[in-house]
Image: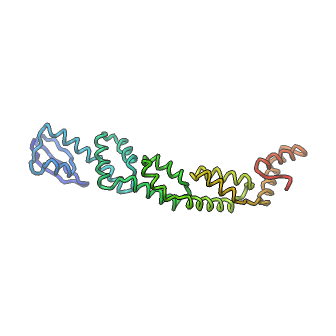
């Protein structure tokens, strides 16, 4: 089949018009690879191969468009291309090409992700590790990156978070606050052993104003339903559950 005409289009594409009145959009790499500008002919048995090869580049440019906006892991790109129904061959071609060009590099991605998380969030190393695993980063890559989050830095983060929580406490007893701090810090991905060590060495003073405020709040609420000894029992029960010793009120 003879190529009657070429038309250059945006995004590195060319439209070729054949003498059988069909037209195709091919990427510049395909035009050069098959020397279509020189031969100006396409054999019928070669056309299918060229179309399939062009799909590889379509997959590649689709992923590249995303990567120019924001960095992604290999697995995130694989999922994106899979969702768009590209073939396994086209996806493999795109990822391999992008890795060779440095657009996909999970080792660098993990280093950047860990560094940014340390600076901008209150996440512990275990939480960051979980997130990198979900993004498909291999253990060799994320474990190396997590070396930045050393024990000294983790302790510093925990101490700052504990201090901040204590200062902002408005309704919890020392006992309940310490329990909540432990649960919150574990949930945030910090080491249980380090949390326990720091909490055990941290003194949280009971705030009598908080105890008084909570007592008055529940007295007002419970006195609508109970009175006398029953009210006293219910108040004691509630205050104990909140970590306050009512005998001191």
Does 203 sit left or right of 21 as displayed?
right
Q: Indicate the position of residue 29 as horizontal and vertical percent values.
A: 20, 51
- Which quadrant of the structure image shows residue 23? top left
Residue 227 vs 214, above or below: the answer is: above
Does 14 sit left or right of 194 as displayed?
left
Which quarter of the image is occupied by the C terminus? Answer: bottom right
Q: Nearer the viewer, residue 19 or 158?
A: 158
Which quarter of the image is occupied by the N terminus? Answer: top left
Who's the residue at 53% across and 51% down the image? 127
Who's the residue at 83% across and 45% down the image? 234
Q: Indicate the position of residue 160 as horizontal and vertical percent values.
A: 62, 62
Residue 68 vs 76, above or below: the answer is: below
Q: Indicate the position of residue 190 as horizontal and vertical percent values.
A: 58, 53
Q: Indicate the position of residue 232 as horizontal and vertical percent values.
A: 87, 47
Q: Residue furthest top?
A: 45
Q: Nearer the viewer, residue 29 or 187?
A: 187
**Total marks placed:** 0
Residue 182 vs 152, above or below: the answer is: above
């Amino acid at each position: 089949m003879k190529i009657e005409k070429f038309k250059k289009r945006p995004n590195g594409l060319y439209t070729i018009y054949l003498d059988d009145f069909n037209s195709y959009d091919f990427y510049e790499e395909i035009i050069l690879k098959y020397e279509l500008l020189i031969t100006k002919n396409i054999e019928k048995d070669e056309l299918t191969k060229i179309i399939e090869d062009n799909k590889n580049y379509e997959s590649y440019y689709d992923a590249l468009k995303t990567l120019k906006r924001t960095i992604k892991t290999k697995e995130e790109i694989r999922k994106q291309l899979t969702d768009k129904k590209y073939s396994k061959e086209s996806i493999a071609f795109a990822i391999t090409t992008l890795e060779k060009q440095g657009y996909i590099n999970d080792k660098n991605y993990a280093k950047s992700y860990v560094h940014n998380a340390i600076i901008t969030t209150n996440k512990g190393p275990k939480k960051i590790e979980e997130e990198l695993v979900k993004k498909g980063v291999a253990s060799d890559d994320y474990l190396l990156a997590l070396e930045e989050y050393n024990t000294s830095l983790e302790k510093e983060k925990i101490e700052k978070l504990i201090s901040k929580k204590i200062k902002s406490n408005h309704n919890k007893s020392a006992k309940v606050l310490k329990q909540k701090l432990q649960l919150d810090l574990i949930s945030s991905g910090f080491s249980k052993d380090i949390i326990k060590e720091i909490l055990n060495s941290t003194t949280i003073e009971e705030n009598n104003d908080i105890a008084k405020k909570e007592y008055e709040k529940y007295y007002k609420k419970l006195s609508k339903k109970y009175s006398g000894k029953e009210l006293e029992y219910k108040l004691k029960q509630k205050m104990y559950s909140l970590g306050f010793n009512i005998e001191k009120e």
